[in-house]
Amino acid sequence: MSSEKETKAPTLNFIEQMIEKDLAEGKHESIHTRFPPHPNGYLHIGHAKSICLNFGLAQKYNGKCNLRFDDTNPEKEDIEYINSIKEDIKWLGFNWDNEFYASDYFDQLYEYAVQLIKDGKAYIDDNSAEKISEERGTPNKPGILSEYRDRSVEENLTLFEAMKNGEAEEGKHVLRAKIDMASSIMQMRDPVIYRVKKAAHHRTADKWCIYPTYDFAHGQSDAFEKITHSLCTLEFASHRPLYDWFINELDLFPSKQTEFARLNLSYTVVSKRKLKELVEEGHVEGWDDPRMPTLAAIRRRGYTPESIRNFAAKIGVAKRDGVSDVALLEHSVREDLNKKANRVLGVLDPIKLIITNYPEGKTEMLPAVNNPEDESAGKREIPFGSELYIERGDFMEEPPKKFFRLGPEREVRLKYAYIVKCTGFKKNEAGEIEEVYAEYDPETKSGHDTTGKKVKGTLGWVSAPQAVDAEVRLYDRLFATENLNDIDDDFKNHLNPNSLTIKANAKVEPSVGKMEPNTQFQFERMGYFIIDKDSTSDKPRINRTVTLRDNWAKQNK
């Protein structure tokens, strides 16, 4: 028996098991997946799981993955959303093999609809949407056959042609598939497959005034592209019989739909409709507000593509819906940035620290480690002098016993500098601490200290004369309620009032003032941050990505 532990192969999820079985049995020579977003909003963190799954499987099994926009609803679609979706996919590290649109197939889909009419499997219904919905019945009550269900093929073809030619008003006619109004599956009860919409399309302009429904376009688009594995989230499971019905009736390539659990995240809304509501009602500053769960917002906040991919891998692919802990997502970005992000000094809520025995006007350059996790990151020099800024919270007039920061007659080490002892302080007229006074021990310089002095506290600081003014935005979770799937009231009632705190008078070390937008770093002792895309050289705007530790776990405990 070998003394060395055998390396176990990673466990395959149920979709990988299915793919390997299909390939082994020769059902497919190679796999072909697709990612099919609706261009009616920005992608969110839930879509990231689907992107990583579809593109990741294609990579793993040397297959292909298409990007296909399901653009069948022109009133809600916009080129802005298409461009943002492409940017998000590339940012996550993936490239598509082909770029398609459902609108590429409008001519084919129309012809297939005509074929269904000729085969007696589709008919024009003049009833209102409300009546059609009412007559569909309930899961426990069969539907009622439409009075128009037995129209002749000739009449149906004539009416459908008139719809296409713009001769019918919106709501006047719809084309329905003729399936089974008594089916236990609601989607099979004569679903609508075409409706009149007199709206210009972003790609086909005014060519069409009838548009296929998602259910009619989706499966056929998969079949046209010869998609071997059509992966959808669980809410589409009830649509699968209809997906198969269209493919079978039209004798198309047998694309197969398989469902997996969508990503639900604690303290997070993953619904484009609800996110759009937040944007349009002004609860956030836009689709890329760093509090939003959109990929554009997550990117702006400083999350890395590697952290998102690692998070998707950790939560895995399941058959049942659940709620993943957002703390795992935050852990993933901490884990990634800990290796990559250089450390810098910054003071968000500054008060002056004056070292009374340090030579006035003297500036000393001190070496500072850029990243203790990465030796190749090297060192930088930071200025030190008699006037510094420290965090207001790092000083207390009457500190408790276990307060290991600065207080009267207490000693601390200034990071990369010296040990100082507080000798006094000054208050303003409002009774707030305005200045703290201290003396330094010149024999305690970091890296050269031979005094043997031991202190329990180490403080961050910034030299006052060289400090750069900055606006720091402390972003937190947008919602205060853990499981937003369990609420009965308006989801907006659960917004976290403390999701954004702005520190308008922060002071940061000189190197931060020279950073380009999107540069990521760690403010020592505080968290990971990024220079915002709208930052200026006059006053950097800085976004907090995540704290160093999970503060919410502590609060909940």
Image (cartoon, grey):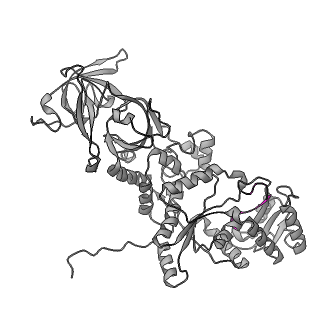
Pick the front one: 260 or 373: 373
Relative to 428, 245 lies left or right:
right
- In the image, is residue 86 part of the stretch drawn in magenta? no
- Seen as rendered, the residue at the extreme top is 429
Relative to 381, 453 lies left or right:
left
Q: Examine the rendering and report whether any part of residue 116 can be seen.
A: yes
Tell me what residue is drawn at x 56 percent, y 55 percent: 86
The percent coordinates of residue 350 (x first, y second) are 35, 27
- Point out the image quarter for the N terminus: bottom left
Task: Identify the magenta region.
Answer: 204-215
Pick the front one: 55 or 481: 55
**Res 115 quadrant in image:** bottom right
- Seen as rendered, the residue at the extreme left is 451
**Res 238 quadrant in image:** bottom right
Q: Judge whether 319 appears above or below 500 on screen.
A: below
The percent coordinates of residue 6 (x first, y second) are 27, 76
The percent coordinates of residue 327 (x first, y second) are 41, 52
The percent coordinates of residue 532 (x first, y second) are 46, 40
**Res 217 quadrant in image:** bottom right
Tell me what residue is drawn at x 44 percent, y 49 percent: 303
Pick the front one: 258 or 542: 542
Tell me what residue is drawn at x 25 percent, y 74 percent: 5
Q: Examine the rendering and report whether any part of residue 272 can be seen.
A: no
